[in-house]
């Protein structure tokens, strides 16, 4: 028997949702500060309006639903999934008011793309966008990458068990430290240290390639936030091609790789355990997967001869591949060139890389390397079972922070999530084909949205059908939260309608 | 009459054959250049648009990104030509509009495979200008009203607590 949610459930969900909205409103003061520094009056007003609306909604929810009770699993998951939708709508307000978006749906698409660290964009005339709005576009991935609920966990919530439920709901299940609040704070600490180092590094690089110092550091901060959080937004319409610089591309590649690594690796490096990177199943799988997919891309590009020089083929092919595999979405070619020049084989290589994604417990999307590694181990174990005598006991283990024995239960849960991702990729591709786009183009764009990549072959643009925009929004949301909290929300809505 | 016809035919055929070797005198859009990059690769083109972002000086040359309204394309020009540019497009200014004549590269071997234009001639067609920003009265009024509502809710919650 399905039980209808009680009023108490709604109150608890409303209370925590209100707190998260208030936390989000607080982050909007960062672009306001930047806007005041650059004397951008109307953009500051856009954010003042958005802050006011967010605070009103957040305050009403907190006051009306005030409770002392902690979250249970179901409530935690629903709070997370709803908070991402609320964040999408509220953060879209200043972007829509900027006048750089065709519709409110487009600005919602942009914010969901940012928060989920995807990087697909519908902005128009980006080269004339204010610093204030541009910073907000890039701050989105930085907030969403660490987790919208995690911000609130680390700032407003003290030692509740509900914190862990929201942490898991945001697609993370690994604790670096025994306490989830401390884990959230450590993730923020690491991210902010990297942000400072990365901004300075990119800023100096920017000055050396001819950017004005102010722009160099502004671009540095933006590119770092969107690169480290594997989003792929850029302050200029040409993306990384704007800089026309090998050094800038190399630095960006490093940032993308660092951002797509498991936060546990950063923690292990922090405590001096450097061997973990070499021994870990996830880093090994990542390395092998990059090599294999690059091999496919390189063969595809070589077959067509579009980059006659090997060094050019490597520079263009490897950058796009790393961008796809880390699920960042930075580009040094134009979207149209993928279809017009790259050919099917190279595109398939990129689609595979996007679908597989980066590491778990990072901001990267896709199926993720630990799952791929576990599936490979399970495959190996089954092969051994076939080859070896029936009486033989086959045991497979892998190293991920510690030595772990492979269990069927673990393989089952990994395969379920993998299957869910594949279904999500296919659904988006089918919707794309329904609107008349070719198969490969549709699959490319769908995989890019669902794996939170952000590479585009040209389908994503303000003129695309509204239903396709909504499909990609749902794909980005589901892909980032890794399904569980969304399944819980669907179950909750079903219980509200059919429960007793 | 026949000789005249023959001459005209030879002239027209030669135009068809040799036209691609000469520059495309009419400005070509960025969409056309990117979508049909193979057709224009290595050929002289004329491209017009607004200078956006930064002029990035690199020794005797400079990178200038030029946006024609659809896409921005990188133009590799002499530092002397780049110094003629006074306004770059941003939130606070419209950039100078320039007409670039140069060789188009689909995957420039000199610049790591970038799609670019190596300018041989740069001509300013329109001066850029600063954009004076005035407060939008609608936004101002809305933020004031919302601020008022916010204060009202806050006062009400204070009363409720008492």
Image: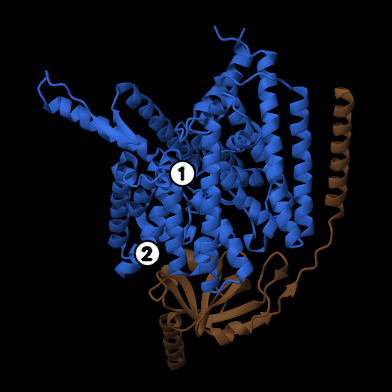
Front one among A465 and A225: A225
Q: Secondary structure at mark 2?
A: helix
In this view, the mark in front (1 or 2): 1
The residue sitting at 51% across, 68% down in the picture is A205
| Residue position marked by numbered label 2 in the rendering | A315
Instruction: Assign the C terminus of chain A to one quadrant of the image.
Output: top right
Instruction: Assign the N terminus of chain A to one quadrant of the image.
Output: top right
The residue sitting at 66% across, 13% down in the picture is A6
**Of all residues shown, which one is farthest toward the front?**
A272
* Location of residue A103 with respect to A181 vertically, above or below: below
Tell me how far mark 1 sits from mark 2, CA to CA.
Answer: 22 Å
Q: Chain of mark 2?
A: A
Few, some or many residues within 10 Å of mark 1 (<14, 14–19, 20+): many
Front one among A135 and A276: A276
Percent coordinates x, y for residue A287 in the rendering? 31, 48
Looking at the rendered structure, which numbered label has been put on residue B108? none
Front one among A53 and A343: A53
Front one among A227 and A239: A227
């Amino acid at each position: 028997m399905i039980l209808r949610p009680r009023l108490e459930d709604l109150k608890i969900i409303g209370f925590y949702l209100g707190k998260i909205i208030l936390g989000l409103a607080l982050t909007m003061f960062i672009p306001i500060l930047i806007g005041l520094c650059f004397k951008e009056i109307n953009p500051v007003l856009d954010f003042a309006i958005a802050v006011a609306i967010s605070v009103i909604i957040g305050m009403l929810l907190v006051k009306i639903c005030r409770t002392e009770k902690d979250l249970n699993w179901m409530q935690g998951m629903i709070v997370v999934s709803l908070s991402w939708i609320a964040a999408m709508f509220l953060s879209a307000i200043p972007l829509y008011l900027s006048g750089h978006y065709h519709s409110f749906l487009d600005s919602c698409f942009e914010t969901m793309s940012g928060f989920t660290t995807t990087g697909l964009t519908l902005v128009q005339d980006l080269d004339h966008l204010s610093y204030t709005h541009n910073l907000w576009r890039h701050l989105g991935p930085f907030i969403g990458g660490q987790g919208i609920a995690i911000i609130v966990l680390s700032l407003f919530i003290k030692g509740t068990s509900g914190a862990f439920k929201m942490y898991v709901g945001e697609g993370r299940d690994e604790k670096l430290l025994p306490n989830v609040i401390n884990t959230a704070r450590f993730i923020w600490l690491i991210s902010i240290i990297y942000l400072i180092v990365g901004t300075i590094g990119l800023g100096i690089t920017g000055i050396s390639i001819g950017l004005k110092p102010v722009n160099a550091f502004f671009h540095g901060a933006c590119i770092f936030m969107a690169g480290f959080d594997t989003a792929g937004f850029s302050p200029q319409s040409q993306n990384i091609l704007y800089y026309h610089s090998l050094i800038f591309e190399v630095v960006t590649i490093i940032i993308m790789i660092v951002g797509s690594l498991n936060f546990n690796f950063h923690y292990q490096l922090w405590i001096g355990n450097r061997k973990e990177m070499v021994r870990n199943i996830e880093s090994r799988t990542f390395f092998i997967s990059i090599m294999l997919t690059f091999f496919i891309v390189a063969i595809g590009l070589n077959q067509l001869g579009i980059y006659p020089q090997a060094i050019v083929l490597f520079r263009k092919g490897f950058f796009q591949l790393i961008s796809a595999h880390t699920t960042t979405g930075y580009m040094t070619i134009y979207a149209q060139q993928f279809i017009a020049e790259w050919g099917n084989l190279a595109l398939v290589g990129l689609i595979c890389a996007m679908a597989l994604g980066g590491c778990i417990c990072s901001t990267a999307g896709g199926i993720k390397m630990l799952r791929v590694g576990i599936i490979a181990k399970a495959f190996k174990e089954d092969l051994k079972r076939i080859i070896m005598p029936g009486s033989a006991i086959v045991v497979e283990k892998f190293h991920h922070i510690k030595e772990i024995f492979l269990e069927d239960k673990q393989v089952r849960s990994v395969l379920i999530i993998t299957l869910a991702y594949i279904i999500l990729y296919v659904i988006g591709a089918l919707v794309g084909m329904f609107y008349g786009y070719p198969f490969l183009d549709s699959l490319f764009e769908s995989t890019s949205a669902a794996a939170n990549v952000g590479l585009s072959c040209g389908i994503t643009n303000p003129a695309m059908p509204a239903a396709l925009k909504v499909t990609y929004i749902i794909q980005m949301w589901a892909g980032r939260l890794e399904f569980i909290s969304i399944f819980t929300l669907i179950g909750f809505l079903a219980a509200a309608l059919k429960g007793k | 009459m026949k000789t005249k016809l023959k001459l005209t035919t030879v002239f027209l055929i030669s135009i068809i054959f040799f036209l691609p070797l000469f520059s495309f005198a009419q400005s070509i859009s960025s969409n056309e250049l990117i979508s049909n990059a193979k057709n224009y690769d290595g050929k002289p083109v004329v491209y017009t648009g607004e200078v956006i972002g930064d002029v990035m000086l690199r020794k005797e040359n400079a990178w200038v990104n030029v946006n024609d309204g659809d896409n921005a394309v990188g133009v590799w020009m002499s530092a002397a030509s780049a110094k003629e540019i006074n306004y770059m497009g941003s939130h606070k200014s419209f950039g100078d509009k320039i007409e670039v004549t140069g060789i188009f590269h689909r995957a420039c071997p000199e610049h790591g495979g970038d799609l670019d234009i190596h300018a041989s001639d740069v001509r300013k067609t329109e001066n850029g200008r600063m954009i004076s920003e005035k407060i939008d009265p609608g936004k101002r009024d809305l933020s004031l009203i919302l601020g008022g509502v916010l204060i009202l809710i806050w006062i009400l919650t204070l009363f409720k607590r008492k």
